[in-house]
Amino acid sequence: MAHPHFDPDTIDWQPFGDFPHFSFAIQHLDRASRIADILFRFKAGEQIVLHRHLALNHTFVVAGEHRIHDADGTLRERRPTGSYTVSPPSPTPHREGGGAEDAIVLFSMRPQPGELLYQILDDQENTVAEVTFEMLEAIEDARRAAA
């Protein structure tokens, strides 16, 4: 019996603005319960923009190694394929990235009403953008309208 495998090239990846080294694909938005299930693809050997997670996040590493870096770039944590993590909101900024190959990670975000998902920061930790559940809804609505 053939075993299917995950093929990331079948996913309709989207860039997140002009931020380099990662892309995303919204899988499901439960608007009533405010749950966003999103795949992120982190480039191998790269670190994405500095940011903070300000809502509860459940993550599952689908492929590759998900790496978490401190604000200064120091490697804090390695999460191999199959790792499942529940992370509460945290004011501590960090960067994420892939290991030797791209990392594909499913994020299931659970913000409370009015709660931000992320703050995107510059290298001096100043907020340059904020991501809300409503922003994800608008992105998904625009994608569906264009399809």
Image: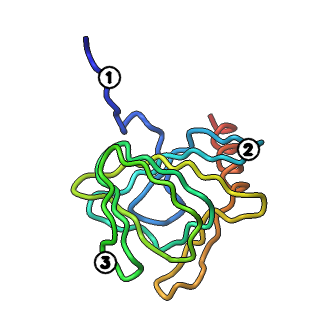
Q: Amino acid at mark 1?
A: Pro
Q: Amino acid at mark 2?
A: Ser
Q: Can you name the residue that lies furthest to the bottom here?
A: 124
* Picture quadrant where residue 130 is located: bottom right
Percent across and percent down for residue 11 are 44, 37
Q: Nearer the viewer, mark 2 or mark 1?
A: 2
Q: Report, in whole angstroms, how far the alpha carbon at label 2 lies from the one at label 3.
A: 36 Å
Q: Residue at x 56, y 71 (%)?
A: 90
Closer to the N terminus: mark 2 or mark 1? 1
Q: Residues within 10 Å of mark 3 (few under 14, many from 20)?
A: few
Q: Is residue 68 left or right of residue 109?
A: left
Q: Can you name the residue that lies furthest to the left here?
A: 100
Q: What is the count of numbered marks?
A: 3
- State the mark number for residue 4: 1
* Picture quadrant where residue 69 is located: bottom left
| Labels 3 and 1 touching (C-beta < 8 A) | no
Secondary structure of residue under mark 3: loop
Q: Report, in whole angstroms, how far the alpha carbon at label 3 lies from the one at label 1.
A: 36 Å
Closer to the N terminus: mark 3 or mark 1? 1
Q: Is residue 32 left or right of residue 72?
A: right
Which quadrant is home to the C terminus? top right
Q: Report, in whole angstroms, how far the alpha carbon at label 2 lies from the one at label 1.
A: 31 Å
Q: Residue at x 34, y 34 (%)?
A: 7
Q: Is residue 63 left or right of residue 92?
A: left
Q: Amino acid at mark 3?
A: Thr
Percent across and percent down for residue 36 are 62, 47
From the image, tell me which residue sits under label 2.
33
- State the mark number for residue 35: none
From the image, tell me which residue sits under label 3.
74
